[in-house]
Image (cartoon, rainbow, N blue to C red):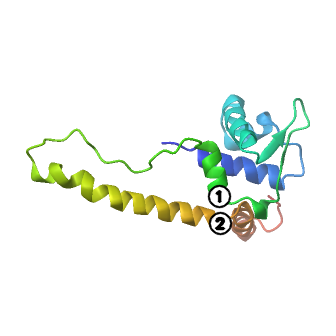
Amino acid sequence: MDTKFSVALHIMVMISESTEVQNSDTLANSVNTNPSYIRKITALLKKAGIIESTQGKSGMSLLKSSREIDLLEIYQAVHPKEVKLLNVHTDVNPECPVAQNIEAVLNPIFTDAEQQLFQSLKARTLEDVIKQMKENHYESHSNQAI
């Protein structure tokens, strides 16, 4: 299972909202992963022009406001090559009538589903995620900031 997108969102929220310096060690602690994996994700975000980072202890920051960063931009940063999300199996029995038609029938359905997902991500921003996260958090931790 590929979790780069959710980890990237986790990182982006931490960078945006934390009052403390965020570096690969502190982010790895929050994500519960290895700092080298965090560096891999942040390198992709940096290459996409979404964040900036400095060597040492000064940490990372957003290059745009959270309301200017849509979720599709983050998704595409961590998945830089166009990858189909839904694929049809192609090693099929050519004599089977279902096998003969499965790809032609499913490919347009899968393409449409992917386009709807991308449109949904484009319509939402990092600020939307942060707002929802704060609402969820404050419901059970009213006296504690994110």
Q: Is residue 110 above or below residue 84?
A: below
* Quadrant of the frame with the C terminus: bottom right
**Few, some or many residues within 10 Å of mark 2 (<14, 14–19, 20+):** some
- Report the residue marked by disc 1: 71
- Amino acid identity at mark 2: Arg
The foreground one among 112 and 23 is 112
The answer to whether the residues at label 2 and label 1 have Cβ atoms under 8 Å apart is: yes
Residue found 26% across the figure and 51% down from its top: 103
Q: Is residue 136 above or below residue 96?
A: below
Residue 9 x %, y %: 67, 51
Residue 99 x %, y %: 16, 49
Residue found 48% across the figure and 44% down from its top: 83
- Amino acid identity at mark 1: Leu
* Secondary structure of the residue carrying numbered label 2: loop
**Few, some or many residues within 10 Å of mark 1 (<14, 14–19, 20+):** many
Q: Is residue 104 left or right of residue 15?
A: left
Residue found 51% across the figure and 62% down from its top: 117
* Secondary structure of the residue carrying numbered label 1: helix
The foreground one among 19 and 46 is 46
Residue 78 occupies quadrant: top right
The span from disc 2 to disc 1 (Cα, nearest Å) is 6 Å
Q: Is residue 115 left or right of residue 7?
A: left
Residue 123 x %, y %: 63, 68
- Report the residue marked by disc 2: 124
